[in-house]
Amino acid sequence: MDPGLVRAVKKQLGPLAVEERGPLLEGWVHTLLRAYAEERELFDEIFYWSPTQAGAIEIDFLLRRGRSFLAVEVKSQRRFTPSLLAGLHAIADLPGLVRRVLVYTGDRELRTPEGIDVLPVPRFLEAIKVGRLWP
């Protein structure tokens, strides 16, 4: 269930608690991906990925289009740190993986030496809108 909807039903309309930001941002990105899925043929399937049952390392969205995969990890942090990339490092050897993207609330766009694209939310949205999410 959407955390934003749950907040509204409970009449919690004030500022977000720190622990709410991540799930709300992930939910918004999921909604965005689904909205553009048909219009832009953004993906054939969308998955959650974790190499273990524990789920300590995971990828929020693994998009499949044909035989290619695109991994998207969403973080609500405003400051980029390499620790945000753990899941994207863990999925690096997935056959067919063509791009890894970290979406975060900061304002600095960069590409890591390992080829992971770090995109602020507005740049991620722009990439979807103009059809540049997939390489």
Image (cartoon, helix red, strand yellow):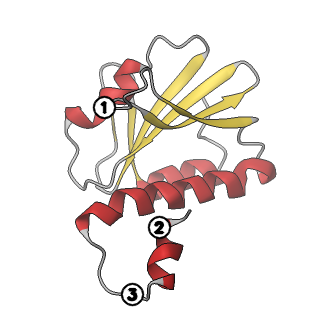
Answer few, some or many: residues within 10 Å of disc 2's Cα (few below 14, many 20 plus, some between 14 and 19): some
Where's residue 28, x and y in %?
52, 61
Which one is nearer the viewer's eye here, 2 or 114?
A: 2
Amino acid type for the residue under numbered disc 2 = Pro
State which quarter of the image contains the C terminus: top right
Determine the CA span between mark 1 and mark 3. 32 Å
> Counting residues from the N terminus, which is met first, the one under dot 1 or under dot 3?
3
Amino acid type for the residue under numbered disc 3 = Leu
**Which numbered tag is attached to residue 13?**
3
- Is 71 displayed left or right of 42 in the figure? left
Determine the CA span between mark 2 and mark 1. 24 Å
Which one is nearer the viewer's eye here, 131 or 97?
A: 97
Q: Is residue 35 above or below residue 114?
A: below
Answer few, some or many: residues within 10 Å of disc 1's Cα (few below 14, many 20 plus, some between 14 and 19): many
Q: Is residue 46 above or below residue 87?
A: below
- Numbered disc 2: secondary structure: helix
**Residue position for label 2:** 3
**Residue position for label 1:** 85
